[in-house]
Image: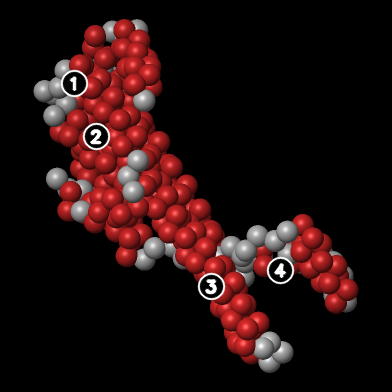
């Protein structure tokens, strides 16, 4: 950790040293904005993963895939086409909600674009110019809205954590099969119940890890956005050293959030809406 902090600081100082004095403040603020932009991209990547996994089936072994394909081909009596071959290979891997999926992809693209456009503001800031200072000031309200949006998504993730819906449905169907199987004696049925319970508990663990990973990305983006907001609001008063320190603190902040427990992340998430506009 110490070596990483030293290396990061050395790199930042080298960058500053290559710049003219009038550009140093602008470039340091740009680095903070880039930190925020990178964090939001990672958050939306995690959000997309969580959404997709909700409708993903349990992974199948190569043997199971082969058996399914052969059985599907044996029962299929129509011509194979580009539109149905995927179903023949793996029925579970094909979603029936293509319209909903397309709508989600469009929504996610719109979300990403908002944050990319915000970060792009800082690409055009000329150090020391009146136009650049004005752009910094005008970026403040935009960031405030984006932070509120991030906080709202985070709050929704805490209240409605992602569930692996298709895998849940498969296990529930298995449980009903066990209950309705009259060929088992009491001991055999109890053993199958115990094995099923282990699979269910493993699934619940996977859901918890999925929520934790997604929350971690959104908390990171939100906290970096909060720090950036302070730099924007106090930009005229800050010197280069203060802005360098802010970039370094951003690096440390990411490490600190990566070390938070699931419960600590939930605690951090609950007050994001209240702090988003402060």
Which of the two discs, 1 and 3, labels the residue nearer the N terminus? 3
Which of the two discs, 3 and 2, labels the residue nearer the N terminus? 3
> Which residue is pictured at 37% across the width and 40% down the height?
258
State which mark lies toward you, 1 or 3: 3
Which quarter of the rendered picture does the C terminus lie within?
top left
Residue denoted by label 4 = 91
Crowding around mark 3 (Cα neighbors within 10 Å: few <14, some 14 to 19, many 20+) is some
Marks 3/4: CA distance? 26 Å
x then y, percent, for residue 201 = 49, 67
* Residues under numbered marks 1 and 3 in contact, where contact means CB atoms less than 8 Å apart: no
Residue denoted by label 2 = 228
* Residues under numbered marks 2 and 1 in contact, where contact means CB atoms less than 8 Å apart: no
Element carrying mark 2: helix
Q: Which residue lies furthest to the left in this view?
A: 237
Element carrying mark 4: helix
x then y, percent, for residue 161 = 39, 63
Residue denoted by label 1 = 242
């Amino acid at each position: 950790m110490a070596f990483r902090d030293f290396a990061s600081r050395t790199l930042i100082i080298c960058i500053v040293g290559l710049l003219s004095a009038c550009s140093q403040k602008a470039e340091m603020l740009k680095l903070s904005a880039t930190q925020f932009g990178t964090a939001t991209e990672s958050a939306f990547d995690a959000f997309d993963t969580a959404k997709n996994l909700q409708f993903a089936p349990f992974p199948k072994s190569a043997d199971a895939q082969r058996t399914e394909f052969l059985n599907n081909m044996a029962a299929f009596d129509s011509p194979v086409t580009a539109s149905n071959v995927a179903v023949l290979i793996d029925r579970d891997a094909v979603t029936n909600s293509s319209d909903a999926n397309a709508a989600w992809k469009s929504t996610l693209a719109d979300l990403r674009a908002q944050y990319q456009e915000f970060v792009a503001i800082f690409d055009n800031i000329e150090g020391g110019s009146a136009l650049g200072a004005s752009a910094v000031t005008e970026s403040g309200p935009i960031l405030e809205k984006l932070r509120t949006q991030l906080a709202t998504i985070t709050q929704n993730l805490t209240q409605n954590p992602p569930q692996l819906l298709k895998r849940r449905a498969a296990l529930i169907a298995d449980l009903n099969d066990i209950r309705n199987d009259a060929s088992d004696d009491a001991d055999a049925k109890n053993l199958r119940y115990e094995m099923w319970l282990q699979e269910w508990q493993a699934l619940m663990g996977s859901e918890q890890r999925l929520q934790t990973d997604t929350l971690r990305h959104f908390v990171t983006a939100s906290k970096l956005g909060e720090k950036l907001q302070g730099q924007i609001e106090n930009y005229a008063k800050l010197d280069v050293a203060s802005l360098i320190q802010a970039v370094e603190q951003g690096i440390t902040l990411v490490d600190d959030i990566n070390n938070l427990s699931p419960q600590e992340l939930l605690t951090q998430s609950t007050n994001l809406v209240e702090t988003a506009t402060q």
